[in-house]
Image (cartoon, helix red, strand yellow):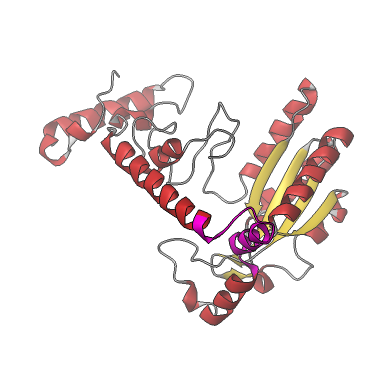
Amino acid sequence: MYRGFKLNEFIDQCFGNARASCKGIQMPVHYGSTDLSFVTISSTLATQMPQAVGSAYAYKRAQNGLCVVCYFGEGAASEGDAHAALNFSATLEVPVLFFCRNNGYAISTTTVDQYRGDGIASRGPGYGMATIRVDGNDLFAVYNATKAARELALNEMRPVLIEAMTLRVGHHSTSDDSSAYRSVDEVRSRDKKDNPTLRLRKFMSQRGCWNEEKDEQWMKDSQKMVMEAFANCEKVKRAPIATMFENIFDKMEPHLQRQMKEMNEHVRQNHDHFPLSLYEQSST
């Protein structure tokens, strides 16, 4: 779907099946791809930011003409790791783009309760960083801002901070009810006015490259593609249960070997409670 990351790979990760790159050792929609240079998403806030600086520093030393893009929200920007990463990136002068999606809420915490300054962009100058604030609901503005930031990072070998202003119209997760802490009418009003998909659709329609017929066909084709992918991924067996002990260290340490042995014995004694036919068998 993006840079060659296929829909099946995306849904495989959600199912945590044996075909998924993470083999089920991750939360859904926390995907990654070594081949496509997507670092696996971490649930812990802001951990990716100092990691991005480290990767960018390695790129700088290798002189390979590459840069790193690190995405995070304004909530993650309140973490200590965020400040450490911004400072390290500036002092080390590394090619990294810090892309902050400021959607107004860190789950239920509003920006008013998060900071008193002028958003996240205002922090950039304090670290000596080039900074861009952009309308996060404008596809072309975001593209051009990111393109300009990338050129600056690579040509001048320094970090760039981008703050994309937007609004989270949905709930934070399936366990969240955002109506408990914000006005439903406000969200609906903003969604009608600032929805990036609707804005792009209107832009394309005005220029004659999109219409209602194409839109309906695209929706049907997309739904069919997703349902077929779901059906395909459901048929794949889950990763071997021993996978939870693997790929943690370069080689399995003695304490993990003991834990795996205990687990295997527990499963053997209680096999009626474990649907092992749904899992691939491990060679370990």
Residue furthest to the left: 272
Tell me: 64 left or right of 261.
right
Residue 50, image x, y percentages: 68, 41
> Which residue: 73% across, 48% down?
143
> Which residue: 56% across, 75% down?
187
Tell me: 113 left or right of 108.
right
Residue 178, image x, y percentages: 49, 72
Task: State whether residue 35 appears in this view.
Answer: yes
Name the image quarter holding the C terminus: top left
Residue 204 colored magenta?
Answer: yes
Judge whether 217 appears above or below 64 on screen: below
Residue 50 colored magenta?
Answer: no
Q: Which residues are magenta?
A: 194-213
Judge whether 42 appears above or below 216 on screen: above
Looking at the magenta stretch, what is its main secondary structure? helix
Comparing 120 with 227, the one in front is: 227
Comparing 136 with 241, the one in front is: 136
> Which residue: 38% across, 22% down?
254
Tell me: 179 left or right of 37.
left
Task: State whether residue 84 appears in this view.
Answer: no
Residue 209, image x, y percentages: 63, 52
Q: How many marks?
A: 0
Tell me: 262 left or right of 174.
left
> Which residue: 44% across, 31% down?
21
Among the 4 quarters of the image, the one containing residue 264: top left
